[in-house]
Image (cartoon, grey):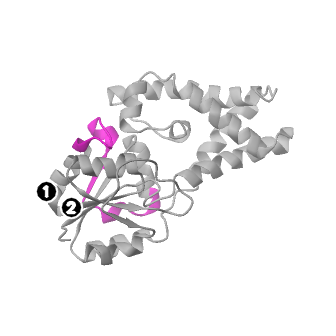
């Protein structure tokens, strides 16, 4: 398997995403329980559903879907006003956040504007406090880079959001090329986002492999671009549906030997 470059997904491949999202929601929901007696699990579910409902009304739904920007990121992330798309979204975000928390509380017959504002801010703090890499990420990235591989990151989402995650995790310095879907206007599984990463690494599809945790985005996208793929199946996380990868691993620690 002669490989010159290794591309990585970010969320739930190198850093946890699903678990921190849930933990941050539950942390805020616990404040609701202590103040108003609503079960934390119940309020967390209510808030998540309310956010999903409102997210569908954002001013650029097709673009948000194309770059893979999620409703919970909308509740805490930063967005760049310089981009016409992200600027429109940024202008809409304050109302989205306000109505998410206000509406979730109303569904439990709670009318407290100051408390609603407070838990909105608390969610942002709780989510940012949970940015960290998986325990196997830094060691493996360091080894691969020392072994001479060109390392690239291909991630869906808004540029400021994804780069904040990357910096906070301590992994930013390992990559020769970082491509965020919001920077290029299209996301995985579109082959163009992978080709943009390969061009930046000065390698062809035949010289690279993609490592990710989602079949429909990472594995399908790699196939669309003519890149071999490695699916990482982390415990407790679903891989979705899509084509079969060339290889599967359960930990990044298996990757160096696989690349050979």
Q: What is the secondary structure assignment of the residue under circle 2?
A: strand
Front-most of residues 228 and 112: 228
> Horizontally, is 148 left or right of 248 in the view?
left
Determine if residue 155 is in view. Answer: no
Determine if residue 106 is in view. Answer: yes
Q: Quadrant of residue 68?
A: top left
* Magenta-drawn segment: 168-192
Front-most of residues 92 and 15: 15
Residue 172 part of the magenta segment: yes
Residue at 40 percent of width and 75 percent of height? 253
| Spatial separation of the CA atoms under disc 1 and disc 2 | 7 Å
Residue at 32 percent of width and 48 percent of height? 220
In the picture of the structure, the residue carrying the numbered disc 2 is 208
Front-most of residues 150 and 243: 243
Q: Quadrant of residue 82?
A: top left
- Residue 147 placement (x, y as % from top left): 24, 77
In the picture of the structure, the residue carrying the numbered disc 1 is 204
> Horizontally, is 220 left or right of 46 in the view?
left
Contact (Cβ within 8 Å) of mark 1 with mark 2: yes
Residue 257 part of the magenta segment: no
- Residue 194 placement (x, y as % from top left): 24, 49
Front-most of residues 117 and 206: 206
């Amino acid at each position: 398997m002669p490989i010159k470059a290794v591309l990585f997904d970010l969320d739930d491949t190198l850093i946890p995403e699903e678990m921190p999202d849930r933990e941050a929601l539950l942390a805020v929901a616990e404040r609701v329980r202590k103040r108003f007696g609503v079960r934390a699990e119940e309020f967390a579910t209510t808030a998540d559903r309310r956010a999903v409902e409102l997210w569908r009304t954002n001013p650029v739904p097709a673009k948000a879907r194309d770059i893979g920007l999620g409703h919970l990121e909308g509740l805490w992330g930063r967005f760049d006003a310089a981009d016409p798309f992200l600027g429109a979204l940024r202008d809409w975000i304050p109302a989205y956040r306000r109505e998410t928390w206000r509406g979730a509380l109303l569904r439990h017959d709670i009318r407290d504007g100051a408390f609603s504002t407070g838990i909105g801010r608390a969610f942002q703090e709780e989510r940012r406090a949970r940015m960290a890499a998986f325990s196997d990420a830094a060691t493996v990235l360091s080894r691969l880079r020392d072994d001479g591989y060109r390392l690239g990151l291909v991630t869906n989402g808004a540029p400021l959001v994804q780069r904040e995650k990357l910096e906070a995790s301590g992994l930013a310095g390992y990559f020769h090329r970082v491509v965020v879907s919001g920077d290029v206007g299209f996301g995985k599984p579109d082959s163009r986002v992978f080709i943009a990463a390969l061009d930046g690494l000065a390698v062809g599809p035949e010289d690279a492999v993609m490592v990710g945790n989602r079949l429909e985005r990472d594995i399908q996208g790699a196939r669309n671009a003519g890149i071999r793929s490695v699916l990482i199946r982390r415990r407790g996380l679903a891989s979705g549906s899509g084509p079969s990868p060339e290889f599967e691993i359960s930990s990044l620690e298996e990757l160096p030997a696989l690349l050979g």
